[in-house]
Image: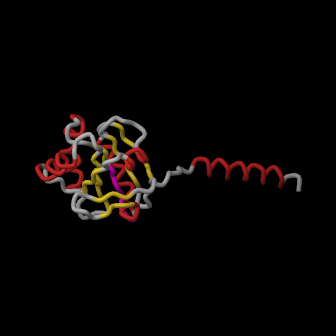
Amino acid sequence: MKKLLPLLAVAFLGILVAIALIPRHDSAPPFSLPDLNGNTIDNNTLQGKVSLMNFWFPSCPGCVSEMPKLIRTAHDYQGKDFQILAVAVPVDALPIVQEYATQKQLPFTVMFDGDKTVTRSFVKTDLYPTSVLLNKRGEIINVFVGEPDFGQLYRTIDEELAK
């Protein structure tokens, strides 16, 4: 019995350490926005797909620089359980966002967050572009302030899609 107690204590500590090392992800905050076509996009849209929510606006130089890479990413993952959800923050007016989306033929869902409610719930900065990567359960796994390293982003997307 005296030998069993230290073993149980070590086993218990091992379990606590293992639990502490398991990555935990926060669920995406509740949100609901219409896309530019009038469809409602909300947390249910995140279920079953790896999602990249990109917070941007058309007059943002970094956002404009990043956009061709997002378009390429959307094309590269077309037909897979991956989606890009572009959330335009209200720096530019809705007609400018609509014109930009049409002109650039954005191949992903675009929404306009007119009062920044959704943006503030996801993003804790006023620096753009900022992107939030979510797993298939709608849990945040990474936040990129500025343009992400697209090589690393692709690796992470591939890992999440394989799960």
Q: Nearer the viewer, residue 36 or 135?
A: 36
Task: Name the residue at 15% across, 47% down.
Answer: 100
Q: Quadrant of the C terminus?
A: bottom left
Q: Which of the 4 image quadrants contains residue 108?
A: bottom left
Q: Quadrant of the N terminus?
A: bottom right
In the displayed structure image, the side of residue 159 where residue 7 appears, left or right? right
> How many marks can you see?
0
In the displayed structure image, the side of residue 53 where residue 9 appears, left or right? right
Task: Name the residue at 39% across, 48% down.
Answer: 117
Q: Nearer the viewer, residue 8 or 128?
A: 128
The single residue placed furthest to the right in the displayed view is 2
Q: Main secondary structure of the magenta part?
A: strand
Task: Name the residue at 34% across, 47% down.
Answer: 115
Tell me if residue 49 is in the magenta stretch: yes
Q: Which of the 4 image quadrants contains residue 144?
A: top left
The residues colored magenta run: 48-53
Q: Nearer the viewer, residue 100 or 27?
A: 100
Task: Let me know if residue 142 appears in the view.
Answer: no
